[in-house]
Image: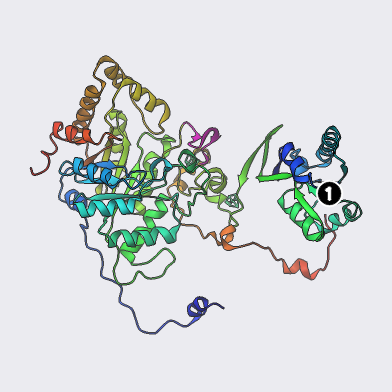
Amino acid sequence: MIVGEQKPFEQIVKLIERYRRVLVAGCGTCVSVCFAGGEKEAGILASMLRLEAQKNGRPLEVLEQTVKRQCDMEFLEEMTTKVGQVDAVLSIACGCGIQFMAERFQDKIILPGLNTKFIGVTLEQGEWAERCAMCGDCILDRTGGVCPVARCAKRLHNGPCGGSSGGKCEVGKDRDCGWALIVQRLQKLGELERYAEIIPPRNWTTSRDGGQRKVVREDLKEQGRIEPR
Amino acid sequence: MTEAAAAKKAPKPAAEKTPPPPVVGPVSGLEKLIQSGGFAVTAELGPPKGLDLEAIHKKVGILKGWVDAANVTDNQTAVVRVSSIATAAIMVQQGLEPVMQMVARDRNRIAIQSDMLGATALGIRNVLCLSGDHQTFGSEPGAANVYDVDSIQMLGILKGMRDDAKFAGGTDVEGGRPPLFLGAAWSPDADPAEVRTLRLAKKVRAGAQFVQTQCIFDLAQFKLEMKKAGDMGLLDKLAVLPGIIPLKSAGMAKFMRKNVAGISIPEDVVKRMEGNKDGKEEGTKIAVETIQAVREIPGVRGVHIMAIEWESKVADIVSRAGLKKGPGA
Ligand code: SF4
Ligand code: SF4
């Protein structure tokens, strides 16, 4: 999932201070699962903003609405009425949701209430970690199912570097060395000989380096508009 | 279509281009010495953090005659300094052979290849490919890192330019190939232990002709890894220059053991340091003894003395180890 974290409250207050009526827009998918931008968080944030404004004698009306996904036009449609009633929308979806909101409501101020962090997994309650850097050409088959792009601080493809120590990364003892994990796993699989293969320089055009990316599926396009799942 | 894109689309001219003549080694003093069976001595020269060229001249003066070549660090510990290319070029002018370090942190493959052509044009021949310390440790922690390629891929690219007259993208190196003596780093004590020699093997296959190691204190461990490397057939074509760091105090030994990855310092070394009030003298003695011991290990073709900000120590160690008699000798 996409993991996000709400911006610090003081920053959010600053973001909206010029507006009288604000819609806090939540998203019910990824950022909801990581407790950052779902319905519950939208509700709490809206209440906190109201309280803060009241305390400081500032006129502020806060609406709230959460849709299933802000990265689908169909769901954004459901927000039309409330968006029409405010000066600005504070979206706590991921960066995609926020932008799609701005694309849908061209004449509305759209503000980011959330920092989009990475795509990752839930390690335990309250802890998430990055797993994929979206390089666009997955090589997990070569690295024992552990991603060197996302999990090595230097995205080394023939690691580890000399900084790997006791299974931890030189960048911080709180992070595993991706290459220590790769070696460990290859060993478990009895595939350490795969380590000996040199992974050649990557073609990064499939990554962000190739310019803005797009996936086109003609087969689906031919079927016409499909209902979002 | 831009002009450049149009030019790319145009059919190639029919005339066959003759590739530039192959590079026939040795290309540097260091390579020549190693090829002829000599025992190489290298040291380190850290460029200054500003235009204090006098500092470079001074270090060159201190090292000249005592070492066969000196590594020029490339913004080591990710702190901004005079570039390794410029410093190495100054050394060439002043008659101290450089081993130019190049890290993968700050350059993509375009810059790596272009810089290497530039460096060889300036008379630089030895290059050491490294991944580089992560930028969050240095003076620009907010910088983006590049890591388009890693040190092993970098070796492969440079080897391709030299041996095949091809750039990484497949186009031809025209006119002349870069005459390079390719090196890498090796940490025989590093984690994870399972791949210490396997990774060395990858470096050799990628193109490394020499490696300088992380500093060696644990001789038994080093012998073991060298034996493994030998058994894998890596030492036939590879010169290993173990790293030597003169300790200054027991505190320094303990600090390094605890905080520097890939360094193993046995307890008896720490005890020796604790046992002598003159830590610097004991550290020098250990360095000299270590050099004499590693000399006996098959595959060791020299030593790399890292006296960080203590360049003046190098001459003393080299002379006490009986390696060289100094300038003019
Ligand atoms: S190799 Fe690429 S696609 Fe696969 S997990 Fe890593 S970053 Fe993601
Ligand atoms: S310590 Fe491991 S994860 Fe960290 S940069 Fe080095 S190889 Fe990559």
Q: In the picture shown, does residue A124 fall above or below B237?
A: above
Q: In the picture shown, does residue B186 fall above or below B125?
A: above
Q: Position of residue B254 (x, y in %)?
A: 37, 22
Q: Position of residue B312 (x, y in %)?
A: 22, 35
Question: Toward the viewer: A149 or B232?
Answer: A149
Question: Toward the viewer: B295 or B83?
Answer: B83
Q: Residue furthest front?
A: A57
Looking at the rendering, the stretch of residues picked out in magenta corresponds to: A166-178
- Say whether residue B9 is left or right of residue B92: right
Please check the rendered image and state whether residue A169 is part of the magenta-colored stretch, yes or no: yes
- Say whether residue B12 is left or right of residue B34: right
Residue B251, picture quadrant? top left
Please check the rendered image and state whether residue A90 is part of the magenta-colored stretch, yes or no: no
Question: Toward the viewer: A60 or A178?
Answer: A60
Q: Position of residue B264 (x, y in %)?
A: 36, 28
Q: Residue furthest left?
A: B329
- The residue under the point 16% across, 41% down is B66
Q: Quadrant of the N terminus of chain B?
A: bottom right
Residue A207 in view: no
Q: In the picture shown, does residue B257 fall above or below A156?
A: above
Label tally: 1
Crowdedness near tag 1: few (<14), some (14–19) or many (≥20) residues, C-alpha within 10 Å? some
Query: Which residue position holds label 1?
Result: A68
- The residue under the point 45% across, 40% down is B138
Q: Residue furthest bottom?
A: B14
SS assignment at label 1: loop
- The residue under the point 25% across, 64% down is B23
Residue B200, picture quadrant? top left
Question: Toward the viewer: A131 or B180?
Answer: B180
User: In which chain is the residue bearing label 1?
Assistant: A
Residue B248 in view: yes
- Say whether residue B26 is left or right of residue A132: left
